[in-house]
Amino acid sequence: MTDPAASRPGSGADHAHDDEAIAELGYKPELKRTLGNFHTFAAGISYISILTGTFQLFYFGIAHGGPAYWWSWPMVFLGQLMVALCFCELAARYPVAGSVYNWSKKLGGPHIGWLGGWMMLTATMVSLSAVALAYQVTLPQISSWFQFIGDGTGQSAAENAVVLGTILITFTTLVNAFGVKLMARINSAGVAIELIAAIVLILLLAAHVTRGPGVVLNTFGLGSGTNLGYFGAFLTAALASAYVMYGFDTASSLGEESKDPGRNAPRAILRALVASFLIGGLILLFALLSVPDLHSAKLSVDGLQYVVLSTLGSTVGQIVLWCVVIAITVCELAVHTAGIRLAFAMARDNNLPAASLLAKVSPRFQTPVLPAVVIGLVAIGILLLNVNQPQIFSVITSIAIIMIYLAYLAVTLPMLFQRLRGRWTPVQGRFSLGKFGIPVNILAVLWGLGMSLNLAWPRAAVYNATGPQHWYLRWGAFLFIGVVAIGGFTYYWFVQRKRTGVLAMHAAVAPGSGGPGSGNAPTP
């Protein structure tokens, strides 16, 4: 793998390449380049959000896989690293808003591109709602004052989660509407706090170790008596890690607003993923080594919140939980930001209803404002499903993660075909996998297929955790994704396909023509 310096960072040649890459896709530069290295890194790591994901899902992993579920963390990292390396090559060549959509369109054609973008956009809006629910897991444990409705059990917990989540989504909508610079400042400050808090948490837990690292070999006897034994239990528990380690592509989705993104975006993607793996892995490890009672029922109910409060005490524990709240907030902000860029990218191609309005860039805030509002409202609407149908909501949330993995496949699979045909050439002087391109790409595709199947498997523990049992919940992944994919693509084929094409106000000027380009550049 190489990343040689073809020119000085930040030079005119760098900016020329970035603008030419956008023009090759048919667009003119419109968004202001204000984001630096740390901003793009922060966007990727805040979407992954170690404190949010580990605190929200540790209970699930330990309940279904015991302490040995820890090994799913490096497993998921290695699989996602293969995907990230492919994305790095693409980010170096096409640092563009709505990266997954534009990459799948460039590599697989307009139909694959639209389907990949549609899946990613739907999943992003559901994920926005899912992350907002994490407030309910943390804030009431800090103070009962945050339990506005009831006592925090049963129906009142679901209703209160909607209230807290709505407040959070409203905040991220306003911040994103006021421009990328404000978003980047808040996000970067939040990420800095999250990283410092995570490192301090690791040190504090390490100071309270009560057992040796052999604990990560303990399976609690889970899976015994079943067809697949512990392997089946481990595959279920691995979802706790798979639900966390994605979203690193956000660093490249801000490419049109970043300085020298062709060079910085690949670095930001890898740094975000590697940092998340190292910090998250150590948090999970030392949590298992330090928790006073490894067999406590609260461990598989309250998860890391229980570990922190029981190990570090209420005062230190609450400080850590406040840092988790900050992490949830910037994670929500990053998810919302990524969704806005994706909607803008699809609308710019006239691939969404009311495209000209959704693709309009505010002259004052220099950002697409309407997508921020629309995505926020849709996310709040989805959140309302949690009031009376929390089990259905958990099914949809799980499915949203699958759709993101499938959207990633819509990039890596066509990319593999292009490589095998000899039609993919990394941009000279930027990130390149070189001779490792084909094997890494093959592993990325196999990983995406395998994990998508594991995520969608009709297991009751995920899709019908509480009674009564319903077949449509167990098979919810296949049913929901089928409806979203087939229904969405039907709409595209009979309605939107006939209108698709770069809107004139966003089209690049074709060299020598003086008029807007078509945006249909040949596949590399």
Image (tube, rainbow, N blue to C red):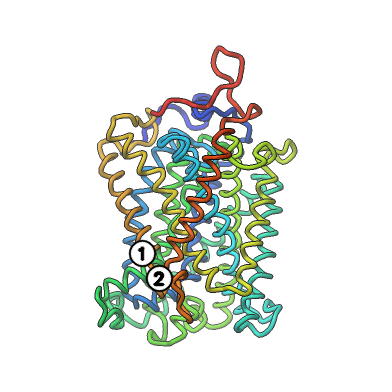
Q: What residue type is labelled 1?
A: Trp
- Vertical placement of residue 227 versus 433, above or below: below
In the current view of this chain or complex, which residue is farthest to the top?
A: 512
Q: Is residue 138 visible?
A: no
Q: Position of residue 441 (x, y in %)?
A: 31, 44
SS for tag 1?
A: helix
Sequence order check: which comes first, mark 2 or mark 1?
1
- Vertical placement of residue 72 versus 411, above or below: below
Q: Where is residue 14 in the image (x, y as percent from the top left)?
A: 49, 28
In this orientation, which residue lies closer to the viewer: 433 or 231?
A: 231
Q: Position of residue 95 (x, y in %)?
A: 49, 36
Task: Look at the numbered discs 2 and 1 and tell me whether their residues touch, using CB distance below 8 Å.
Answer: yes
- Residue at image x 67%, y 36%? 356
- Vertical placement of residue 397 versus 14, above or below: below
- Vertical placement of residue 496 versus 308, above or below: above
Image quadrant holding the C terminus, namely: top left
Q: Between marks 2 and 1, how big is the CA–CA gap?
A: 9 Å
- Residue at image x 43%, y 70%? 474
Q: Can residue 520 be seen in this view?
A: yes
Q: Quadrant of residue 245?
A: bottom left
Q: Is residue 159 left or right of residue 4?
A: right
SS for tag 2?
A: helix
Circle 1 is placed at which residue position?
73
In the current view of this chain or complex, which residue is farthest to the right?
A: 364
Q: In this view, does 448 lie to the left or right of 374?
A: left
Q: What residue type is labelled 2?
A: Leu
Label 2 vs label 1, nearer the camera: 1
Image quadrant holding the N terminus, namely: top left
Circle 2 is placed at which residue position?
284
